[in-house]
Amino acid sequence: MDATSKKLIVTGVTVLVGFTLNQIARKSWTKIYDEEPPTTNPSEEINWKNVILWSIVTGTVISSAKLATERYLTLKLKS
């Protein structure tokens, strides 16, 4: 397998993991708080606690999972 194919596989799987975890986070947020997760649309009734919580959870969890996936697949595809 050449380097380009490996990069495409790693990128594709990493994007898929990020998308899947984002969907799970959205559904979980809706189930827990009975409302949609915060969006980038400004609102006068914005709950900053929820915005910060959403940003921390999704940013940390999804970024960490994507990084772990990328590193794992890169190492596995080398051998």
Image (cartoon, rainbow, N blue to C red):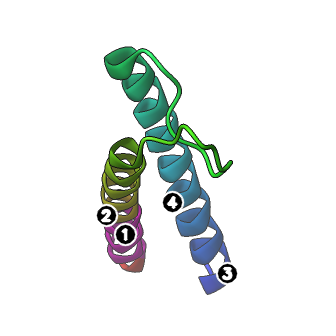
Residue that numbered label 4 is attached to: 14
Amino acid type indicated by mark 3: Thr
* Residue that badge 3 annotates: 4
Q: Circles 2 and 1: CB distance less than 8 Å? A: yes
Question: Magenta stretch?
Answer: 66-77
Q: Residue at x 31, y 65 (%)?
A: 68
Q: What distance separates the C-alpha of mark 2 from that of mark 4?
A: 11 Å
Residue identifier under label 1: 67
Picture residue at 42% right of the left edge, 15% below the top: 34
| Amino acid on which the number 2 mark rests in the picture | Ser
- Where does residue 19 sit, x and y in percent of width and height? 56, 45
> Residue 12 sits in which quadrant?
bottom right
| Secondary structure state at the residue bearing disc 4 | helix
Residue 66 placement: quadrant? bottom left
Whole-number angstrom distance, CA of label 4 to CA of label 3: 15 Å
Q: Earlier in the sequence, mark 3 or mark 1?
A: 3
